[in-house]
């Protein structure tokens, strides 16, 4: 269904990429990228063949089908983790009503994919415009493809921690601890995704001679991280404090970094006085 | 019966020389029985050791702990498997689904062998310790479990490098160790959830205790007291 057929309208595009015998270490890509059938097989493909996906992005031919698959992976994997995140109150057996517990679960399962995709939407225009300044020949579809690929990778890594988060929600009774656990898992997935982004951008863009390129790329990564954390802070609650009433969004106050610091202090206090919040 | 003899021969080969057992991990055809053998035989070895823990309190706790220890490892592997599979793709040998699972099962069965080999000593200490020896037994079992866990991680790393072909040779121990830390944390919390194992002489015996606190609280309190 989603094959990457090469349109036959230019010579450049129809030229097959044949691997030469003398260079066995070259990536084998003498055929159009063919994604396997089935959702989980595609997730597996994303994990096992990052080189093929980079190669398809480099050729910049019919990226629509690939982008659609990456988009689906992002949404489903993020929703999976969000569901586990929102289920904390239910798993911990907190006192809030059952229907609100399930509502939290549903809302968070929608919020987490939305968080990732809105961040992408916000950072794409500045990244695309600034990339043209330094003379990179990254096309818009390539940029979106690269960012979606790293996003899909991030959410797959995040979803791989869902079973661990589920287990700890089920066997502990401390809200602050679970909150920090989720922050740690997001940080791990985010860093893995950034590493993926760095590798694939370098592979797709190739060598950019401009001296500002390296700094611009670091600025992109910082922009991405700050937009993501700020948006996450605006969209809270994700886990849902059992002591507070249910709200779709909390009123705006404080910031993410301050909150993480306070949670660490809170957890320290909880551990010194067991039974207070457990 | 002959099949099981073959399986145990294959398995022992993997225990003794994991670096030469790549094909055992990689070849998927006809390995469902071998997977079942690994789970079943591993569970028996774990049960043998687990019973020595509960025997301190009595026969009934010995049976309960003997059933709980295989469950502890099975649950820990199942919970840790998705993250292991993804780490295997990020910084590891990029094995397929089936081989990754078998690799983990073989590594965990190494843990079971080390535990079972210590079991006679564990029985000896349990039967010859008075009621006041509870603290000693706690420390002994924790140390043995930690050491055998470390052994299984080393076996896992060697298998990863052997089975990964050209990519596998470059698998860094640090990446494998980072998953090892996660595995240890899940295992410790699972052990805490399934306690009591030995049965404190001060508390009435129940097969499972209610969920309260966590393994980390215990560590925190130990550090604070020291």
Image (cartoon, coloured by chain):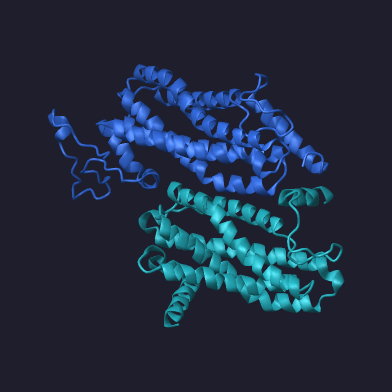
Chain colours: A blue, B cyan
Asked if residue A149 shows in the view, the reply is no
Front residue of B35 and A105: A105
Q: Residue at x 36, y 65 (%)?
A: B27
Q: Residue at x 17, y 31 (%)?
A: A7
Asked if residue A133 shows in the view, the reply is yes
Whether residue A147 is situated above or below residue B89 in the rendered picture: above
Q: Is residue A218 left or right of residue A210?
A: right
Q: Name the spot of residue A149 as percent of width and height, x first.
A: 39, 35
- Location of the N terminus of chain B (image quadrant): bottom left
Q: Name the spot of residue B19 as percent of width and height, x first.
A: 44, 67
| Quarter occupied by residue A100 | top right
Q: Name the spot of residue B215 as percent of width and height, x first.
A: 72, 52
| Quarter occupied by residue A59 | top left
Q: Is residue B109 left or right of residue A96?
A: left
Q: Residue at x 61, y 63 (%)?
A: B71
Q: Name the spot of residue B143 as percent of width and height, x first.
A: 70, 64
Figure label count: 0
């Amino acid at each position: 269904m989603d094959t990457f057929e090469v349109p036959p309208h230019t010579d450049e595009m129809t030229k097959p990429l044949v691997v030469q015998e003398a260079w066995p270490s070259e990536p084998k890509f003498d055929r159009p990228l063919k994604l396997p059938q089935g959702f989980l097989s595609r997730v597996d493909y994303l994990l096992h063949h990052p080189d093929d996906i980079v190669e398809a992005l480099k050729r910049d031919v019919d990226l629509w089908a690939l982008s659609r698959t990456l988009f689906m992976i992002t949404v489903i994997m993020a929703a999976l983790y969000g569901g586990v995140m929102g289920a904390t109150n239910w798993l911990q057996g907190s006192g809030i009503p059952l229907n609100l517990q399930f509502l939290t679960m549903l809302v968070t399962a929608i919020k987490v994919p939305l968080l990732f995709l809105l961040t992408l939407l916000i950072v794409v225009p500045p990244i695309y415009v600034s990339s043209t300044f330094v003379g990179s020949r990254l096309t818009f579809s390539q940029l979106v493809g690269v960012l979606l690929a790293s996003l899909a990778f991030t959410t797959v890594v995040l979803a791989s921690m869902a079973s661990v988060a589920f287990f700890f929600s089920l066997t502990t009774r401390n809200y602050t601890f679970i909150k920090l656990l989720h922050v740690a898992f997001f940080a791990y997935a985010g860093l893995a995704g950034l590493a993926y982004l760095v590798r694939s951008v370098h592979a797709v863009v190739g060598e950019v001679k401009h001296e500002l390129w390296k700094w611009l790329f670091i600025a992109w990564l910082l922009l991405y991280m700050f937009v993501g954390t700020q948006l996450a802070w605006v969209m809270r609650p994700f886990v849902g404090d059992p002591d507070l009433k249910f709200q779709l969004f909390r009123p705006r106050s404080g910031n993410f970094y301050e909150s993480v610091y306070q949670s660490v202090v809170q957890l320290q206090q909880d551990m010194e006085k067991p039974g207070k919040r457990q | 019966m002959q099949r099981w003899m073959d399986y145990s021969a294959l398995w022992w080969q993997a225990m003794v020389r994991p670096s030469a057992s790549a094909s055992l991990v990689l070849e998927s055809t006809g390995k469902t029985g071998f997977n079942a053998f690994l789970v079943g035989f591993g569970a028996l070895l774990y049960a043998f050791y687990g019973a020595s823990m509960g025997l301190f309190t009595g026969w009934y706790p010995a049976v309960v702990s003997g059933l709980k220890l295989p469950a502890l490892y099975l649950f820990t592997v199942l919970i840790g498997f998705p993250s292991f599979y993804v780490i295997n793709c990020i910084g590891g040998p990029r094995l397929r689904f089936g081989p990754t699972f078998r690799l983990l099962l073989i590594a965990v069965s190494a843990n079971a062998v080390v535990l079972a080999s210590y079991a006679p000593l564990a029985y000896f200490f349990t039967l010859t310790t008075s009621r006041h020896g509870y603290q000693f037994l706690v420390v002994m079992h924790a140390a043995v479990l930690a050491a055998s866990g470390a052994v299984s991680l080393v076996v896992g790393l060697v298998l990863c490098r052997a089975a990964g072909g050209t990519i596998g040779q470059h698998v860094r121990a640090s990446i494998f160790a980072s998953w090892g830390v996660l595995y240890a944390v899940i295992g410790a919390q699972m052990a805490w959830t399934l306690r009591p194992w030995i049965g404190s002489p001060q508390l009435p015996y129940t097969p499972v205790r209610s969920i309260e606190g966590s393994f980390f609280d215990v560590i925190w309190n130990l550090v604070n007291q020291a």
